[in-house]
Amino acid sequence: MQIPPLKKSTFWLIVAASVLAGIVIGGLFVGYVAFYKFKGELLAVAQPPEINTALTPEQIQKATSLETDRTIFGKVISKESDKIFIETTVTNLLDSKNSTTTTVNIPFDKEKDEVVIAKPASSSAVSSTVQIISVSLSDIKIGQQVLVKILSGKKTIYLLPVSE
């Protein structure tokens, strides 16, 4: 049976609508099956990642290591003739509530390391408002706040005023 020329456009219109409807219904069916099959993976991807904010022993060790270009602030808890022990706080920057206190052993080499006190300079000094006074390791008191700067292998211990 041959389609008359006037009915040909209607035939192609019905075929196109049927193919389009089949594609839409097939796509919906495949999407439905795929969603239920991979629902767990899709929901896991949609969740924000969990960030572990617990401090690990490796992070604490790295924060308190005496490598070059490091600054450590803390309170002196003990001292010996060639080293001091300071108590410092290690804080996780992602979670400031998650912090810990640890002790750092700082060896002191009298030939290359130094202990200094920074005091306001007298008004006659033109170039600087701070005067650096070199002192010895014996001037450090238990309970005193110190700032230890390690630059190029040399440790400089800055003494801060004793809190009362």
Image (tube, rainbow, N blue to C red):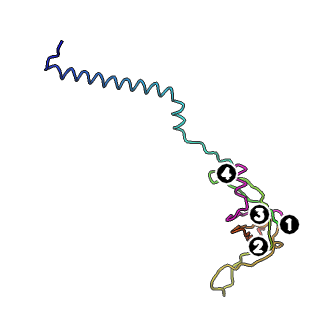
The one nearer the camera, 88 or 1, is 1
The residue indicated by pointer 2 is 112
Q: In the image, which is nearer the foreground, mark 3 or mark 2?
A: 2
Task: Return the disc, 3 or 4, that comes first in the chain's sequence.
Answer: 3
- Dot 2: element: loop
Q: Residue 21, relative to residue 110: is it above or below?
A: above
Q: In the image, which is nearer the foreground, mark 3 or mark 4?
A: 3
The residue indicated by pointer 4 is 97
Query: Is residue 15 a member of the stretch shown in magenta?
Result: no
The one nearer the camera, 144 or 8, is 8
Q: Amino acid at mark 2?
A: Lys
Check the picture and name the quadrant holding the C terminus.
bottom right
Task: Return the disc, 3 or 2, that comes first in the chain's sequence.
Answer: 3
The residue indicated by pointer 1 is 80
Q: Position of residue 120 (x, y in %)?
A: 69, 79
Q: Which image quadrant is residue 119 in? A: bottom right
Q: Amino acid at mark 4?
A: Lys
- Dot 3: element: strand
Q: Position of residue 81 (x, y in %)?
A: 86, 68
Q: Label 1 to label 4, Cα distance in Å?
A: 33 Å
Q: Which residues are magenta?
A: 55-80
Task: Return the disc, 2 or 4, that comes first in the chain's sequence.
Answer: 4
Q: Residue 63, relative to residue 124: is it above or below?
A: above
Q: Are marks 1 and 3 in contact (CB under 8 Å)?
A: no
Q: In the image, which is nearer the foreground, mark 1 or mark 4?
A: 1
